[in-house]
Image (cartoon, rainbow, N blue to C red):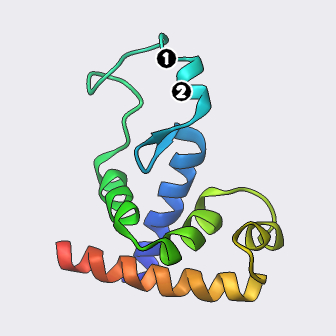
Amino acid sequence: MIDWTRVRLSQWGYWCRHGGVYLGLPRAAAFTHANEGARGTDGGRDMPDDLAELDRIVAQMPHLHRQPIMAYYVREGPLWFRALSVGCSPRTLCRRVQVAEQWIDRRLAALD
């Protein structure tokens, strides 16, 4: 099941980078383009339900788990740069991501 959780996290990270909103906080570009397109649930850029479920779980995570997940799945750039943004080595970042993925996997399993 952890593999499926990683797939969902990858999809969530992609949506966060290209869709505009994650963890309830809009990107700066969302304010710039506020008057373009639809608003609300009638055709706007709302997060798909399965990703929104994952987004809520990530938002509830302790900061120690959320920070590596955000760096690994949402931020772009080489691994060493993402690790630097968290303040650790790439190897430590990968280990923290594994722990956070397991935390998320358990939460998803509890919802099913």
Dot 2 lies on which element? helix
Query: From the viewer's perspective, is residue 38 above or below residue 50?
Result: above
User: Quadrant of residue 102 in the image?
Assistant: bottom left
User: Quadrant of residue 4 in the image?
Assistant: bottom left
- Percent x, y for residue 38? 37, 16
Residue 42 appears left or right of 85: left
Marker count (numbered):
2
Q: Residue at x 36, y 83 (%)?
A: 1
Query: From the viewer's perspective, is residue 21 above or below residue 62?
Result: above
Query: From the viewer's perspective, is residue 16 above or below residue 5?
Result: above
| Residue 112 in view, yes or no | no
Query: From the viewer's perspective, is residue 67 above or below residue 92?
Result: above
Q: Residue at x 63, y 68 (%)?
A: 72
Q: Is the residue marked by circle 2 packed among few (<14), some (14-19), or many (20+) residues within 10 Å?
A: some
**Cα separation between marks 2 and 1:** 6 Å
Q: Is the residue marked by circle 1 packed among few (<14), some (14-19), or many (20+) residues within 10 Å?
A: few
- Residue at mark 1: 34
Do residues under tags 2 and 1 come within 8 Å of each other at their CB atoms? Answer: yes
Residue 86 appears left or right of 77: left
- Residue at mark 2: 30
28, 39: nearer the viewer: 28
Residue 81 appears left or right of 70: right
Name the amino acid type tagged 2.
Answer: Ala
Q: Which residue is drawn at 40% across and 64% down?
A: 58
Name the amino acid type tagged 1.
Answer: Ala
Task: Say the numbered circle drawn on residue 61.
Answer: none
Dot 1 lies on which element? loop
Q: Which residue is drawn at 19% across and 79% down?
A: 110
- Percent x, y for residue 26? 49, 36
Residue 15 appears left or right of 52: right
| Residue 37 in view, yes or no | yes
